[in-house]
Image (spheres, helix red, strand yellow):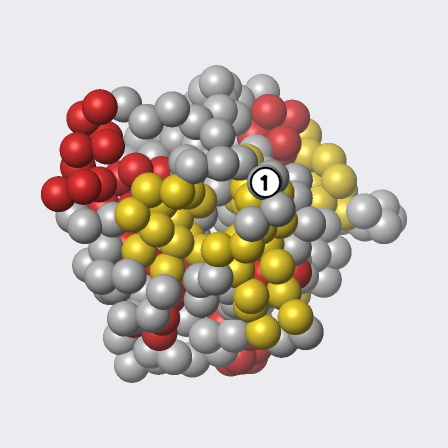
Amino acid sequence: MTPEQFDTAIVGGGAAGLSAALVLARSRRSVVLLDAGAPRNAPAAHMHGFLSRDGFPPSQLREIGREEIASYGVRLVPHSVASARGDVVDGFVLTTDEGTEFTARRIILATGVEDVLPDIPGAREAWGRFLLHCPYCHGYEVGDRSLAVYGGVPGAVVQALLVRQWSADLTYFTNGSALADEDAQLLHVRGIRVQDGRIAELVLDGERFVGVRLDSGDIVPVDAVFLRPESRPRTDLVVALGGSVDGAGFAHVDASGRTSVPGVRVTGNLVDPRAQVITAAGHANAVAMDVNADLVDDDIRAERRMPR
């Protein structure tokens, strides 16, 4: 069976992928969007900082986005992409996990990142509810309550200095790591308590968060914990197509999301893992415009080669 052909294939159906699909479809491009339905912000009940949609459930935003792009003729495929091959000259071929193939002149990857949570009891159950990663997303909702920062990971002290903006009742858990003198002084200046001891568990009682249990057995009661997790990029398809990535696995890109593979761009959290929904959607909007411009150039070259 001959694979369906599209101007652009977009992998990932979060805010970035949907935004790119909308721009390209409105540019009268044929678009297929492939998405396995496992968004990064699935545990979050609400999103914030998105003008006109503050407090809106991210699941509803995705549902509305799918309806909008479908109205412009975007083909929605609810499957993951198992493999990718090809190039910008002969076209790219994407194969889904069920074996269906799609060909495209360009690829936009909006597959996002995977947040790596601490390997302790309660972490996954608390994630997105009591274990939070972004103070700009969740800080207002837990403001002036008893908060904590999960220390011993890169950027934890900087995050604590930031979270202090939302609450004066803030504890920094060293999690068994030694604090540099400068960091200890900064925490002191901001009025942030320092709690030694390794974190053993995030304690929940049904739908209630109890606090942080240390390896000593002591439980420190707090209402929420902020963590800056490691973000593992989903760049397998970049690598499969011959693209280069850095030591953390992120693709080498320019400001417009171009990877080292001609015709393949990335957007959203694959470019900036800290990007909020509105930022990811905005970047994808610009990337889609650049992709359309690339396709226009291809069309012009093809038309010049056609006999008159």
Q: Can you identify the residue that label 1 sits on?
A: 216
* Residue placed furthest toward the left: 189
Q: Nearer the viewer, residue 38 or 251?
A: 38
From where the camera sits, is residue 29 visible? no
- Residue displayed at 65% across by 70% down: 205
Q: Position of residue 132 (x, y in %)?
A: 45, 57
Residue type pointed to by label 1? Ser
Q: Nearer the viewer, residue 306 or 129?
A: 129
- Image position of 191 (left or right of 196): left
Q: Position of residue 190 (x, y in %)?
A: 16, 48
**Where, quadrant-wise, is the C terminus in this rendering?**
top left
- Image position of 117 (left or right of 135): right
- Residue displayed at 46% across by 75% down: 46
- Residue displayed at 65% across by 40% down: 119
Q: Nearer the viewer, residue 143 or 26?
A: 143
From where the camera sits, is residue 245 visible? yes
- Residue 73, compared with residue 242, is above or below; it is below
Q: Position of residue 41 (x, y in %)?
A: 53, 61
- Residue displayed at 53% across by 79% down: 60
